[in-house]
Image (cartoon, coloured by chain):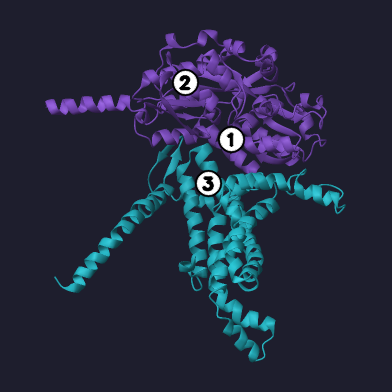
Chain colours: A cyan, B purple
Amino acid sequence: MSLAAKDRRQAWGLLAPALVWTAAFFILPFFAMIALSFAHMEGREIVRGFDPGNYTRIFTDPVMLEALRNSLEITVVVTVISIVLAYPLAAIIAFRVPACWQRLALLLAVLPFWTSYVVRSYSWLLVLGQNGVVNKTLLGLGLIAEPLEIASTRAATVIGFVHFFVMLLTLTIYANLIQLSPNYARAAQDLGASRWQCFTHVILPLTLPGVITGAFLTFVLCIGDYITPQILGGNTELTLPQLIMLQLGRSGNFPLASALSVVLMAVVTLAYFASSRWLRLDRV
Amino acid sequence: MTANRLSATSLALLLTATPGLAQELNALVWCDHTDPALIEPFEEKFGVKVNLKEYEGTAAGLAILDQSQPGDWDVLVIDAVDVKRAVEAGHMAELPADKLATADFFPELVMAENNVIDGKTYAVSEKFGYNTISYDKTKVDPADMEDMAALTGGKYDGRIGIYDYYLPVLGLVALGQGTNTADITAENLPALRDPLMALRKASKQVSDVVSAQTALATGEVDIVVGGGEWLTAVLAAENPNLDWTIPKQGGLRWAQSIGVVAGSTQPDLALEFVNYITSPEGQARLATSSCYWGMPANAKAGDALTPEQKAVLRWDQQPDFLKRAQLYPIPDAALDTAMQDLWTEMLAQ
């Protein structure tokens, strides 16, 4: 046996556990889900076959289309706001905080990750409620005459999401910023660039992979999240994951839930291709 | 052969003698059964570990059973109106009627029409209550809460929460329109659309149990349609202003049943669990579970409840409440789908 053939066999041997794992827990369930999405319900029975009716319904039923639109709107708004807030925070930690304190600063930034996601969502509900901290503070300062309606609105959902994803984006952007040599900025300024020009023409393009990586992860996690819209949104509008849960928990309509999940995966895949040029998932 | 028999005997002795390998009972339940105060007395008496898995919605519970192997589950707690559905799916085992405590039950809670199918008993009622109107009596006029029409009259716009469960709320809307829950059909369901949407328009949110409790307790909403003692009783000690009533149009009675899962490898132990839950002691603990309170089906549980607990449960008013409350609608598959589509449309408004 040649050395190359032996190396190949060793490589396949090392890869085998990961391949088996992926095949068993992703590829097979994925194809099973696709197959189920073409089944339909007769009464409470699932009838397997090739019926595109679920997809037809998703793209013609106004309720389903609105859920898809709501999910996309919320996800895009959350992603943009999170980037705008996370970038300066990451920059401050990378460039302004002394190196010996940066680890602590990052630890503080991700501290909210340590609490349960559900508990955190319910906590936001209390903070944003009519008698919550936000309204009491604003009323106390005389800035408002009546409590603001924040809880059980889309704004509450966005706030809950942004709180979570700013932490994630801060990490990915910081990881990119910290690798930048200060010589790039010095060289740009030596050549006459203003601080703003230095940022827009040098720093930002070089840190785009970190931003896009964080944005992609935010997009994926946000569009598939069920808990935050359910708790903070007060069911005032439906998102795609809520619609999927309605099919599973109430109707037992697994074919339609599968079709909705396939559409959700298709949206995420499109987001991946749109951002793949800059994606550096190895930096996460 | 002898060696094999010795090995098997040794293994059996080891299993019974090792505390860490004690017998286990697997139960698919609602959250009120997860209260340690309810489960621990049974575990101690029988020296078993009860593994509890919560589920929400009958479809989800039946899906778990569909995907399980016979013997995976021993006990099932299910909406009383869905017992037939579980039996038809082959998930429930027949119970020995003569070994059940139904003779001590409130007569309305025997619910033979739900728990007995083709002359065979498959489940026994364990807890019940009402889906009506919960409210904060310091924020709303209690007299208004006696009439469902007040909810959409404009006075309480934006102060109402709706319990996120289509069967009881559609049932309440039907009662408001003068239709009994048992008379809801595919033909008259469209007539419920406008009043349901009007209720949605007047409401601030549609919430699950925890969110509805939180909203009422924090003043986010002042009224919860579909609420009842299960929503407010657990908060009564902290907030005595929370109350509930059955309006003049009537309310809905919810009831949950418990039974043994078909294929259980330990049906005797599972039956012991069912009998413990429906015993006066188990019933009192279940009625005051930390997840939500509700009336016990066994009338003798009154002896195990304190006067304060009975007051919160409105024990003395039960005869009147039972007369004025109707059971959940029991839709066939087609009507169920239509009701859920209407509910989804309401959520999307």
- Callout 3: few (<14), some (14-19), or many (20+) C-alpha neighbours within 10 Å? many
- Amino acid under label 3? Ile
User: Above or below — where is A64 with respect to B184?
Assistant: below
Label 3: which secondary element: helix
Chain holding disc 2? B
Nearer to us in this view, A5 or B155: A5
The residue that appears at 63% across and 74% down in the rendered structure is: A95
Chain holding disc 1? B
**For mark 3, what is the residue?**
A244
> Which callout, 2 or 1, points at the residue further toward the start of the chain?
2
- Alpha carbon distance from label 3 to label 1: 17 Å
The quarter in which the C terminus of chain B is drawn is top right
Q: Do labels 2 and 3 share a chain?
A: no
In front: mark 2 or mark 1?
2
x then y, percent, for residue B70 = 34, 30
- Alpha carbon distance from label 2 to label 3: 38 Å
Q: Residue B42 carries which label?
A: 2
x then y, percent, for residue A89 = 65, 66
In front: mark 2 or mark 3?
2
x then y, percent, for residue A65 = 59, 53
Asked which quadrant contains residue B264, the reply is top left
Q: Residue A82 carries which label?
A: none
Nearer to us in this view, B309 or B274: B309
Residue B122 in sight from this viewpoint = no
- Callout 1: few (<14), some (14-19), or many (20+) C-alpha neighbours within 10 Å? many
**For mark 1, what is the residue?**
B339
Indicate left or right for A88 with B277 as reference.
right
